[in-house]
Image (cartoon, rainbow, N blue to C red):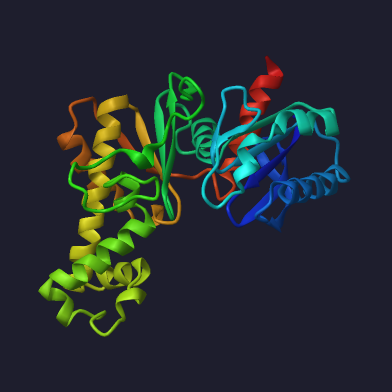
Amino acid sequence: MKNFIGIDIGGTKISGAIIKNRTIYGDVIKKKTPFCTSEILENVFNIIDELMKKTDVEGIAIATAGAVNNENSKVIGSTGNLPKDYSSTNFKKIFEEKYKLPFLIENDANAAAFAEYKIGAAKGSQNSITVTLGTGVGGGIIIDGKLLKGKNGAAGEIGHIVLGIEENRPCTCGIYNCFEAYASGTGFKKTIQELSKTLPEFKTSCLANTNYDELSTYDVIQGYKNGDKFCTLAYETWEKHLIIGLISLANIFDPENIVISGGLAGEVNYEKVEKVINEKIVTTPIKLLPANAGNYAGMLGAVLLLEEKVEK
């Protein structure tokens, strides 16, 4: 099997590894993500140079925050935690000229979805959605075995499905009531804070003496598992928000499965949520699955996408 280099550029760190036989081979190298495109590139170059000392490689693939164009050459819309000039950088030109190797860059959530489809929880299916529940809500959509990109490459912004018309809760994108504003870790915390002011159960909760700003998803989940009434109500409210968004996705795309990844993936009651979704959707039943492509699904998926291009 061919060896590739996979890179994951996130808001706080850059990770890189040799991908061999569709798995990470050897150690993962990590560096800080600076708030400057030239320094990000320099850190990526350093990681690649170090990895190339260990083995010959057939290509380089990057998974990154931000929407990526259909040519897999540049970022067309970077996120707030990346430099403004990041989206004007032609990564493909820079890396192919420097290393004389095939190159590809893809959005990290799209790449992770492709990894789940090829080697992870959704392996064997042709229509799958991966939803990442972290600080925000990201995702990728596989239709008939192909990654859905849209006309310019920005398709699959799952976190920005709008859940209601009232301007109740702002999202980081600038509008109100996005899926991300409720189902993400950040949204869950906001729900907890709001409910602490309105639910009488909070006064007798294990969190009653916790400062408003310090109320956390971790504490609520622990309280929920211990039977605390307020924590149970807060968790179930977050769960309802999650279900509403997943129902919308199932109704639009009619997937075989929806895969959940990210920091909150381990807190989902898969059997219950799947049952409720299938009771309410108007399309065919789905399976709700925990992701299993691993913590580096983004870089693995980017390499798998490049591998397909190289083989054509």
Which residue is at a point 32% across and 73% down the rendered structure image? 215
Please indicate whether residue 153 sits to the left or right of residue 198 in the image: right
Q: Position of residue 85 (x, y in %)?
A: 64, 42
Quadrant for residue 252, please give it: top left
The relative height of residue 285 versus residue 208 in the rendered view (above or below) is: above
| Residue positioned most to the left | 200
Please indicate whether residue 42 sits to the left or right of residue 222 in the image: right
Quadrant containing the C terminus in the rendered view = top right
| Residue 254 visible | no
Q: Position of residue 118 (x, y in %)?
A: 54, 30
The relative height of residue 242 versus residue 254 in the rendered view (above or below) is: below
The relative height of residue 175 versus residue 2 in the rendered view (above or below) is: below
Q: As rendered, which of 202 and 34 lies closer to the eye?
A: 34
Q: Position of residue 242 (x, y in %)?
A: 28, 48
Quadrant containing the N terminus in the rendered view = top right
Which residue is at a point 66% across and 38% down the rendered structure image? 62
Quadrant for residue 45, please give it: top right
Please indicate whether residue 25 sits to the left or right of residue 64 in the image: right
Q: As rendered, which of 50 and 20 lies closer to the eye?
A: 50
| Residue positioned most to the top | 312
Please indicate whether residue 211 sits to the left or right of residue 55 in the image: left
Q: Position of residue 40 (x, y in %)?
A: 71, 49
The tally of labels here is 0
Quadrant for residue 275, please give it: top left
| Residue positioned most to the bottom | 209
Which residue is at a point 17% across and 27% down the rendered structure image? 282
| Residue 36 visible | yes
